[in-house]
Image (spheres, rainbow, N blue to C red):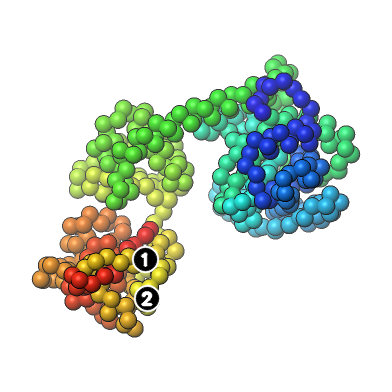
Amino acid sequence: MAAGAAHREFSPQYLHEILSSLPTPAVYWVAYSGGCDSNVLLHAMATLAPRLNGSEVRAIHVDHGLHPDSATWAQHCVGTCRELGIDCIVETVRVDRGSGVGLEAAARSARYAALRRHVVETHILLTAHHRDDQAETVLLQLLRGGGAHGLAAMPLLATFGAGRLARPLLSVARSDIKKYAQHHDLYWVEDPSNFDTTLGRNFVRHDIMPRLEIRWPEAGAILARGAARFAEIADLIDTLAHQDLRRLVDAKSAGLHIDKLLQLPHNRRKNAIRGWLRKAGIRSPSPDIYERLEPELLRAGPDAAPILAWRGGQFRRYRDRLFVFTSLPDAPEAFCERWPLVGKFALPPGLGFLRVVKRPGRGLSRAVAGRSDVTVRFRRGGEHIVPVGRGHKHSLKKLFQEHGVAPWWRERMPLVYVGDSLAAVPGVCVAAKYAAAQDEQGLWVEWRR
């Protein structure tokens, strides 16, 4: 139900109508903190359980260990769930206080990581975010300089790990949630940190929103409606970025064609890049990084290999392509492990895997697969190979340049050896000595990053 619809008091029937508009899962997980909001959601779900078309209701409580009473709160949650006939799992997490992102963000990251472990493909996680939470999020995003996606705030339904996350109370005011809790004599715990106004959200909640509502009583509802409109704008922005990226992304390297990117108007170019980052799951940089991108990378000389980094990512250029990474894994020089050229071969963290694809007359001879001295290594310098059809040695450096392998991947490129001889460079070439015959189903080694 959209914010601004005719006011109705919260009830299990109201919740049932919201859930009926969503996919039907095998399991509804209630993210149960023990606070008022999640208590109300849990109680309403327990009431609805017989009407959920066979969907099971379970609860999960995350103990962050940040308060001396956190273990007592966890016991309270288990006891409440027992009274309601709902299974409850308690996850104890360690919050990284030295992460540099702040305690609140670090706790949220640890909490969601724990929740994702339980939400599989046929499950939906329910959280008790409500209309006032949505309004606070819009204000915070405005103060942080958020764009349309940030101001769209929290969606009703989103992908979450292998499953989904739903926020069925987004149209419900905090006052109605409190009224429901009092009517049903619910007991909840209060985390003192919720009243710490040195935290941004609590300052907005306890100091700013009450003042706004004195002057504009419907401020919460108005801000929530604004979030819905920004969500529509964000959807249009995504559609435009998707259209542009179909033309910009190089299928072979996954980088963006810089010449085509420069043909776009400035704002549309930034929109395409933002869409590219969202698709890659990389946090968008600050506006000054976007302003530096054109002069420092997009207009750089053809032989330059510049880097533009920010906290959480980095842009790189090679030839006429723009690339983006969160970070690059270490180059594992001493790595050497056997591989029978069967199935997937897991590489060190961050480097993906190797696999074999059968191709007529291409790749390694099947006879190689039976050898016990086939290994995977990484570049140490000075490597040479006689590629199929060349007749003489080529340095790996020259082959990398010829095939457009970006400089930062060269020392991280997995190499297949037979004994001490370089036999295959994945996706680039194989040594003539070990190559498949024209009438043979060869073993072509692919590297998937």
Write the residue at 20% across / 43% down: 301
Residue 27 in the image: x percent, y percent?
68, 51
Q: Earlier in the sequence, mark 1 or mark 2?
A: 2
Packing grade of label 1 (10 A; few <14, some 14-19, many >=20) is: many
Quadrant of residue 40 within the rendered picture: top right
Write the residue at 27% across / 34% down: 262
Farthest residue in the top direction? 215
Write the residue at 26% across / 70% down: 441
Q: Is residue 72 left or right of residue 26?
A: right
Is residue 69 visible in the rendered image? The answer is no
- Distance from the alpha carbon under mark 1 to that under mark 2: 10 Å
In which quadrant will I find the C terminus? bottom left
Residue 444 against residue 48 in the figure, above or below: below
Residue 23 in the image: x percent, y percent?
62, 42
The amino acid beneath tag 1 is: Leu
Q: Is residue 351 left or right of residue 29?
A: left
> Exactly how many numbered labels are in the figure?
2
**Which mark, by number, is residue 306?**
none
- Residue highlighted by disc 2: 339
Packing grade of label 2 (10 A; few <14, some 14-19, many >=20) is: many
Q: Secondary structure at mark 2?
A: loop
Quadrant of residue 343 within the rendered picture: bottom left
Q: Secondary structure at mark 1?
A: strand
- Residue highlighted by disc 1: 354
Q: Pointer 1 and pointer 2: residues touching (CB < 8 Å)?
A: yes
Residue 220 against residue 128 in the figure, above or below: above
Q: Is residue 309 left or right of residue 306?
A: right
Farthest residue in the left direction? 391
Residue 269 in the image: x percent, y percent?
34, 32
The amino acid beneath tag 2 is: Trp
